[in-house]
Amino acid sequence: MDALFVSNIAPNDSLIFWRILASNTRYKHCKMTRFFSFFIAILFSQSLFSQSKPLMRSEGASLQTAQDFIDDLANHDLALDVILSNWVVVENPSDELYDYLEVSLEEIRLNLSTKDLALLEFKNYRDLPAREVRDIDPEGLTTDQMFFIYHKGRLVTSLYLIGKKIGSFTLVSKGNNLAHFVTY
């Protein structure tokens, strides 16, 4: 900037001075544009990856909970009442409810016994195509905590997690072609 205030430049020389300055600036501008473009591209790609990492981390704990629950349920050496007390959140306990939940767990266990557990796919609600979730009404529940377990493309069971426990494994019809999770 000091060169702009040089007092001994004649008026005719200023045009030459500005042309030289402009030609040098174009060269520098081209280099700087490339540098900034590269820098912006790196920042943009980092922001793309940084947006997906927290989701994966928060989903990781929930996904692990769902997988551990299914592993325990598939283990016939574990009693269903133990699985029920260790894994399932029951807010309004009653003998009838516990009997119902044990029968439901037995049905899922029976269904899992005919499946290769290595082929199970755990899909989060947000990862499902719109046609598969259009008939599910979350009813204010957190969809990030909803997992659907598939075996060879067929639904085995659905889980709604509350913290590190199962809030529901019961997806029932509520009419009007909609289903919802029933919490216990």
Image: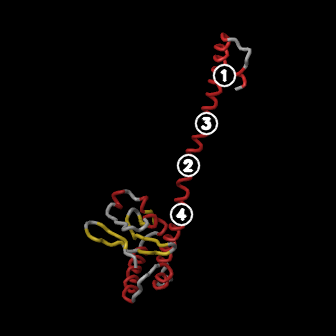
Q: The disc labelled 3 sits on which kind of residue?
A: Phe
Work out whether mark 1 precedes mark 4 in sequence or the reverse, and give the earlier one.
1
CB within 8 Å, label 2 to label 3: no
Label 1 neighbourhood size at 10 Å, few (<14), some (14-19), many (20+)? few
Q: Residue 76 bears which disc, if any?
A: none
Extreme-top residue of the structure: 12
Q: The disc labelled 2 sits on which kind of residue?
A: Ser
Q: What's the residue at 49%, 67% (across, down)?
A: 118
Q: What's the residue at 37%, 72% (across, down)?
A: 181
Extreme-left residue of the structure: 176
Cα separation between marks 1 and 4: 51 Å
Work out whether mark 2 precedes mark 4 in sequence or the reverse, and give the earlier one.
2
Q: What's the residue at 33%, 72% (across, down)?
A: 172
Extreme-front residue of the structure: 7
Task: Name the image quarter holding the N terminus.
Answer: top right
Read off the residue under disc 4: 58
Label 2 sits on a secondary structure element that is helix
Q: Residue 47 bears which disc, if any?
A: 2
Work out whether mark 2 precedes mark 1 in sequence or the reverse, and give the earlier one.
1
Q: Residue 36 bears which disc, if any?
A: 3
Q: The disc labelled 4 sits on which kind of residue?
A: Ser
